[in-house]
Amino acid sequence: MDNIKAEAITIEERSPFQVVMMRFVRHRLAMVSMAVMIIIFIATILAPYITSYKIDELNVNNYFLPFGATDEDGRVHYLGTDNIGRDYFSRLIYAGRISLTVALLSVLISETIGILVGAVSGFYGGWVDAVLMRFVEFMLTIPTLPLLLIISSMLLRNENLIPIPESVLKVVGDIMLLGPKDARNAILIVIVLAGFGWLSAAQLMRGTILSLREQTFVEASRSLGATDIWIIFKHMIPNAMAPIIVDASLGLAGYVVAEAALAFLGFGIQDPIPTWGNMLSATQQYMFDKPWLPLVPGLPIFICSLAFNYIGDGLRDALDPRLKL
Amino acid sequence: MTAYLIRRVLQSILVVFISAVASYVLLSFAPGGPLSGLRQITQSGRFRITEEDIARIRASFELDLNLPIRFSRWLVGVPRGPLTIGGKEYFGDAVVGCRKPIEAEITNSRGVTEIITVGCKEEVLLKDLVGRRTSRGILLGDFGLSWRLLRDRPVSDLIESRIPKTLQLIGLETLLSLIIGIPLGIYSAVKQYSRFDYIFTTLAFMGSAMPSFFFGLLFILLFSILPKNAGQAYIPAGLSESVRNYTIPLIGEVIAGSAKDRTLHLILPVAVLTILNIAGWSRFIRASMLDVLRQDYVRTARAKGLGQKMVIMKHALRNALIPFITIVVFTIPGLFGGAIITESIFAWPGMGRLYILALGDYDYPVAMALFFILSVLTVIATLLRDILYTIADPRIRLH
């Protein structure tokens, strides 16, 4: 009897982080998605070790080899070869590395810009807020996809228009396993995508900051003599992160699809560099004879998009159950 | 309300103007155009096209004019010559462009040789513009001449033939999505946590994560290629009508260009657009319906003994549709964007596909015209949405 009583009163204390994690772990589909994405990430990180071909290695006269064909060196084309004899499996893995890096970089850049713009706009209000938010609203009224197409077609034909430091090219090139020239192409797409992606994050951030601004802890902090910068970075942004994290996760799905869509339409990362989008685009003309071909690069796009969406959904449920749509 | 409307309309005009300037400037930085390739044409070792020819071609496409002048002529059709006030001409000698630029080859720091313009041999003066062929400006619906797709023919000819095709797709898509999507969303909300609701929400979630280009290819595979290869009845994909007659098992012979042919070609693109659209819309209806069903007035309606049908249709649905209307209005301009991808997959001869062709083929007047039309449509839809908000929900005050 004593035991039961003791159990009833002592409630194990949990930090907010633990509470969120517990709720997130309970979202089954988000957990499955998490597992799938971890496998895909590990595969792309280990790309040079699990693939036996380079992305531009041609196997002359071996066009459209079937799944599991072996070449004279005994290496296996797990998914066969493409129309000019390049190993499909290797290209798919490397493409994943490039597509996912593009998506991650775009999310990182767009959320950072969005957080800063939204925080400044919401915190200061007045004309700063008016100017910034009118600009965001203006950008949101422009039809996005047509404008993305114009900008990327212009940038791709005029690659040197935006100067990109050599060091950035080298670092990004090393992550994507590409030379500096190819890395420039990928970075341009990141710039195009992130250049429009920060708008919704800024609006989201501003809304949260507006409600936080009136809270007593901000007032308390100010009465202790805290500077604006301190309040914004120490109190505002950390407290407003929940919706941003959800937005970032959904944003990853959006960027994977957007990058693939641009490449699919011919205005994204161009062919010798593999991405899921341009591989899918290339299968179009052969799908009449080889109907399984579009599935190979198409399914990873869909799986990543779905997984990031489920993770975002799970995070939303975990971080703030009221936000559920 | 009136003051708000006036301010919003002025704002919208500004948005359209700025986006027109921005995209015009962007595209004028892009290389290519009617001159690309011409310089390389040689005959017995010599360039066949003389400097004079190039100057003439440049003039016919207005490439010899400075950017602001060219933009102003494109937008509103002026200046057409010197300013005439009371019979006297002004600014006739103002320089507005360069007929024959001096070009130099330089090698940049990365070792790439580039041709850049360093000066001007022969300038274009404002008075030279008199008598030049000019458009009335896109604001008056004159989009100028196409550069490459239909060389020297008016852009409006190209676009006019494409608009009905896109409207056909989008109109059918919207109609079908409303007819199918709203009942699905309502039913799913009313039967929350039922098996139907579970399956529906899962499918709708997948649908909204599905990239339209992959979905389109899957549809072509499943309903066109695979059945055709297997000798079964299939649905034709690609173009809006076929070139020659064909026979489909079960359906029989189809005459190219007939109503039957065109209907068959509509099925797949409309199905792809509609299904993806329903996934988004009905999810929204469901959420908004669930929200309303929790309200006190619904409980009151139930408490006073109204039937389930009455409660749902009269009390809940009307209120649930309010936010939905604005969503529908706002997605309409997005539909044109979505049509770009779907039209490309199905080689559907609409505006979206024309846009891709024009951008890919350096036909910038066509691309600009389409972009301008899309911007105007988007801005109008945004304006409509904000006005509808207030009509649907009087609690929202305009300021």
Image (cartoon, coloured by chain):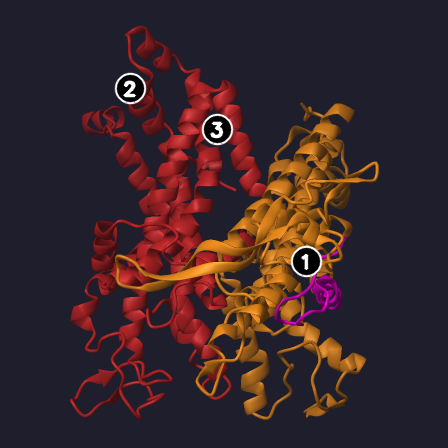
Q: Is residue B112 above or below residue B129?
A: below
Estimate how packed mark 1 is, as few (under 14), some (14 to 19) or many (20 or more) residues with alpha carbons within 10 Å: many
Residue type (three-letter) at the residue carrying disc 1: Ser
Chain under callout 3? A
Could you give the CA–CA distance between mark 3 and mark 2, rounded to whole angstroms? 20 Å
The residue carrying mark 3 is: A207
Residue type (three-letter) at the residue carrying disc 3: Gly
Position of A240 compared to A267: left or right?
left
Residue type (three-letter) at the residue carrying disc 2: Trp
Q: Secondary structure at mark 1?
A: helix
Tell me where residue B349 appears, x and y as whole percent: 67, 71
- The colour of chain A is red
At horizontal 31% and vertical 12% (from top left) the residue drawn is: A221
Q: Residue B31: tell me if it is visible.
A: yes
Q: Nearer the viewer, mark 1 or mark 3?
A: 3
Q: Earlier in the sequence, mark 3 or mark 2?
A: 3
Q: What span is in magenta?
A: B141-168
The residue carrying mark 1 is: B177
